[in-house]
Image (cartoon, rainbow, N blue to C red):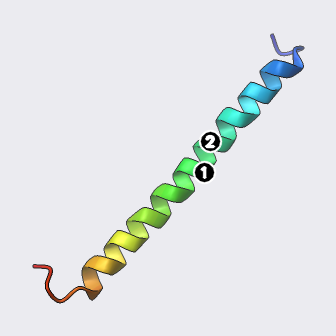
Amino acid sequence: MWQDPGAWIAVGVSALFVVVALIMHRVFVKILKSGQADDPKHD
């Protein structure tokens, strides 16, 4: 399996999706936390 270039492409794309998902998660959490702190109407 590891000799097949298609397998390496699939593994690379999967790893890229995981990295992008983690980065987006951190960004969304940061935005939500800062938005919550800045909003005076939020209780």
* Numbered label attached to residue 20: 1
User: Can you give x and y, in whole percent of width and height, for residue 8 in the image?
Assistant: 81, 25
Q: In the rendered structure, which amino acid carries the disc numbered 1? A: Val
Q: Residue at x 56, y 57 (%)?
A: 23
In the rendered view, tell whether residue 19 sits above or below residue 1: below
Residue 18 location in percent, x, y? 59, 42
| Drawn side of residue 31 relative to residue 27, left or right | left
Corner quadrant of residue 32: bottom left
Percent coordinates x, y for residue 21 in the rendering: 54, 48
Q: Which residue is mark 2?
A: 17
| Horizontal side, residue 13 vs residue 22: left or right | right
Identify which residue is drawn at 60% across, 51% down: 20
Please rate how many residues cluster around mark 1, counting C-alpha atoms within 10 Å: few if below 14, some from 14 to 19, many from 20: few
**Residue at the far top in the pictured view:** 1
Q: Is residue 17 left or right of residue 36?
A: right
Left or right, 19 with respect to 2, comes to left
Three-letter amino acid code at the position of disc 2: Phe
Vertical relation: 24 (above or below) 11: below
Question: Is there a contact, CB below 8 Å, between mark 2 and mark 1?
Answer: yes
